[in-house]
Amino acid sequence: MAVTKPQTGLIGLGTMGAALALNIAEKGFPIAVWNRTTSVTHAFKAGAGELADRITPADSLADLVAAMAPPRAIILMVPAGPAVDDMLAALTPHLSPDDLVIDAGNANFHDTNRRAAAGLPFRFLGMGVSGGEEGARHGPAIMGGGAREDWDRIAPVLHAIAAKHKDQPCADWMGPAGAGHFVKTVHNGIEYADMQMIAEVYGIMRDGLHLSAHRIAETFADWNRGVLQSYLIEISAEVAAAKDPLTGAALLDVILDKAGQKGTGRWTAIEAQHLSAPIPVIEAAVAARNISARLDERRAGEAVYGPAPEPTPGVTLADLQDALTAGKILCYAQGFTMTAAAGVAFGWDLQLPAIARVWRAGCIIRSSMLDAMAQALTEDPARNLILAPRFTAEIKRCLPALRRIVAAAALHGHALPALSAGLAWFDAMRTARGTANMIQAQRDFFGLHGFDRLDGKDLHHGPWAQA
Ligand code: NDP
């Protein structure tokens, strides 16, 4: 019997690549695979169980290409950066113009733009994949960028392997060139902020209310049944409930408070600055990871200024839940407005409702609130989420709690960088007469930059200009 040659291939059988390849095979698509270390390729096939029949291992790139039927679609799942450029160069002599290479790693979208513009002698897509190993294996969220017709060609495979939200695949084309990797970057920025805000309310529960990890786990589990239902709250409950196998203590209590990062949150913050798009909650979350890494300085600070934070009277779990709800809405509003600004700046027709829909399942920030956001953005994609009726009601309900929590934290020495940044942003955004008139006067004083007037009259410098 003639064996059908696969049209889909995958390079890089690490954590993500192996899981993605098994997912593709499981959905009925034969797949050819190659890995830099050949033994990994064969171990992968050997460990694929009943899916092994659909997997064609290759020992060289030439073998990989020869094992596939044209036009080919080859997914790259290697570390972002030079490894991607090296693989594109190595594939070049083997591929035809109709073949398609899909970079599915966490590329910086500027690199994807550069590669898309470089005139590669084959088709090229940049694709953000979220959901970690479990998502890659059983249903990630997928954000594609490049030529629409290339996306459409591979879409049947991607729709089959993606997470589903009410039967709708969480995989979509975001726009040209680096648009997919850009949306994935913003996803990761929001992920940093979601995680930071959860860590902040955890901190108040631990240090302000002196709750045990067990009680904190119960609280998160309870919140996961309400408006905060999300993957990150769900796993926060699980990690808070976990015991350390070595000591039997709560695992959270033995983990060093020093967070790592791979840089996608930082990329979001940097890009927001370039776009003049305010995302202070995400920026605070990135800064908080950097502060967490300065352990020695923090210890020296505590030695000088005394122990903090203090027990915090008056704080309730209900207030913490509502403060987190408000913070989350404010953070997402910032993330979506930044995405809209990028769409304008880069000439990409980024569809905010489609982005919210893709994030509803499979990815790390998946949550029930994203479904409501998708609906609000569908009603009016140009409207800031804080002005969408369903969210204005929720913000009004939760705002007093956010104020109480931020105020109590400030009085008792708890650091809440992301939640307080959200509140400050909100207060600035709801203030029609702000304070930038002072900035403008100062700028005119020292630099004759001029100012506009409320009364529209034609005098744009202060009396100091004549001096
Ligand atoms: P791993 O470290 O588990 O695997 C890396 C893979 O790339 C291995 O197969 C490795 O081959 C191969 N590789 C490394 N360097 C090169 C190179 N110079 N040339 C060719 N192949 C190379 O990484 P992950 O699977 O975790 O990540 C892969 C990509 O997916 C990254 O861009 C990552 O940022 C992204 N990503 C990861 C997520 C995660 O949760 N882990 C989530 C979403 C995206 P070898 O066996 O020879 O070392």
Image (cartoon, rainbow, N blue to C red):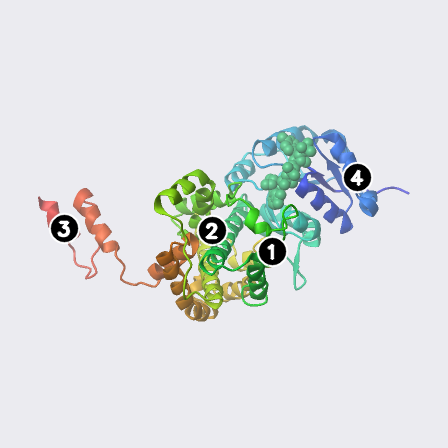
The kind of secondary structure element at disc 4 is: helix
Give the foreground label among 3 and 4: 4
Mark 3 lies on residue:
462
The image position of residue 376, as x and y in percent, is 50, 66
- The disc at residue 45 is 4
Give the SS element for disc 1. helix
What is the quadrant of the N terminus in the image?
top right
The residue that mark 1 highlights is 235
Q: How crowded is mark 1: few (under 14 residues within 10 Å), some or many (20 or more)?
A: some
Q: Assess mark 2: CB under 8 A from ligand 1?
A: no
Seen from the viewer's position, the closer of residues 84 and 331 is: 331
Camera sees residue 271: no
Q: Which residue is drawn at 60% across and 36% down?
A: 79
Q: Mark 2: which amino acid? A: Gly
CA gap between label 2 and label 4 equals 42 Å
Which element carries disc 2, helix, strand or loop? helix
Quadrant assignment for ligand 1: top right
Q: Name the residue beneath numbered marker 2.
A: 343
Seen from this angle, which residue lies furthest right?
1
